[in-house]
Every structure is written in C-alpha cells, then in structure tokens.
Image (cartoon, rainbow, N blue to C red):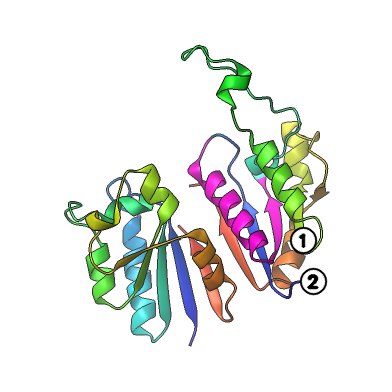
Amino acid sequence: MSAKTLTLALMDPPYESANSTTALRIVAAALKKGINVNVFAYEGAVNLPFKDQAPHANPVKGTTVEEEEHPTTRSFVASLLEIGNGDPLLTWVNCGLCVDERGAGNSIEGVKRGGPGDFLKMAQESTNNLVIPTR
Amino acid sequence: MNSYVFIESRDPFESRDTEFIVETATTLKKSDNEVIIYLVQNGVLAVRQKAVGSHLARLAKEGITLMADDFSLRERGIVATEMISGVQESNVAELIEVLVRNNTKAIWH
C-alpha cells in the first residue's frame, strides 16, 4: 500500500464548473503516481457519480448519442474507481444528507455513504488535503 | 520552513478577489515560507504578455514560484512564447508532487 494519501473535498455539482474537471484530473494524476486518494463529495458534488446520468445526442449539430460521445461525470468517476480499486486506493464518500436532499442515492458501484465525520477522519490521516469550494 | 501552494482558478480580470492571493502569498513569502502558485482554469489568463496589469509580475519579483497548468493553457489557446517570464508551464502531475511533500499546505482559490 502506498504511504501517501491525498484527501479532496468537492462541492460543485456536475456540468456547472471547471472545478469538477480539474478535481477529477487531480484524482487521476495522484492515482497514476500510486498515491491513495480520498474524496469527500459534499453538497452538489454528490451528483458526480449519480448512476442515472445518460449521454445525449446533440440536436444543434445533428449528431447521435454515439457520434456525440458525450462524457458523463459518473463514467469518469467509475474509471477512477477502477484505477483505484486496491493499491493505490480511491475511497469516494458521498455526504449522506446531501444525497437525501437531492434524491441522488442511486450512485455507481463503489461509492460510499458517509458524513462530515468521515471527512475529518480522512483528513487527519492524509498526507495533505485540498478543499475545492464553490464560489 | 513551511510550503504553501495556492491553486488559483480565477481570472484576475473578472474577479478582484485575486488580490487576496497577491497579499497572502507575498506576506507568506516575506515570512520566510516557500510559496507556489499553480494557475489553473481561467487563472492562466494572467500569464499572457498582453495581459496588461497582470498581478503575476509582482509575484515573480517577490520570488514566488509560478506554475501554469498545461491543459488550461491549451484550452485557452495560450502558448509558451506568449507567457511572461517567471511563469513555467507545468501539469497536474507536478502539482501532485508538490502537494504530497511534508509541511505543505494547499489552498484552492
């Protein structure tokens, strides 16, 4: 198991801010370096791994779903969980109350339910922490 | 010595909030800390030579390390030859190396 661990707190919902893209890039880069990563998804960020997200066609360009290859954040998170399924390990915790408020309980496999106490524990045990807030 | 990494995502021409980075980073540097600013997203718009009034030259003069995210540069069509001196093109992998060093605090802005 890698000795170093990075914990991130995310708050932005999907498809709203470039923060989400950057956060997922940071997670991917850390895992590629063999660094364990914890993600605590808070507020709108609990929708990042929402299983019901569906790619769509683009009627403006006239492209089909297949041609458009519209990326979903849930597929990005699924890929990251696949990379981080052991050593290094990616632990993704969705804030339970935030999930309930948003009806976002149907997450992809591998996403855990937790609360701020989990974030505190992960932060205390990490090499470093990064909070990416909404503006 | 402590290290501080500011990850600056904001466009200085959109938000006066970036002055927070200038004041805080400069103060920390003068207090004998290592200070790194990693520019990402619209934060990289300040690296252009034509960005008149950019705050980055002041930060470079203070000895603060300025790194610009390559992905964000490419998205915005900014090439290395357009960048002011004192800013180095970087990437998320290098950011990770900094983040996992001992005694390093990370601040997203």
Q: In the depicted view, which residue is nearer to us: B6 or B74?
A: B74
Residue shown at 67% from the left, 60% from the top: A31
Q: Examine the structure image and report whether residue A20 is included in the region drawn in magenta.
A: yes
Give the x, y percent position of residue B102: 59, 81
Q: Can the viewer see residue B40 in this picture?
A: no
If the image is split into quadrants, where does the N terminus of chain A sit?
A: bottom right
Q: Mark 2, chain letter?
A: A
Picture layout, residue A123 above or below residue A24: below
* Residue highlighted by disc 2: A1
Q: Secondary structure at mark 2?
A: loop
Q: Residue placed at 23% from the left, 62% from the top? A: B84
- The amino acid type of the residue labelled 1 equals Leu
- Against A54, residue A133 (above or below) is below
Instruction: Give the magenta-colored segment's residue range.
Output: A16-42
- Residue visible at 41% across and 71% down? B36
Q: Are marks 2 and 1 in contact (CB under 8 Å)?
A: yes
Q: Residues within 10 Å of mark 1 (few under 14, many from 20)?
A: many
Determine the image quadrant of residue A86: bottom right
Q: Is residue A36 left or right of residue A11?
A: right
**Foreground residue among B101 and B104:** B101
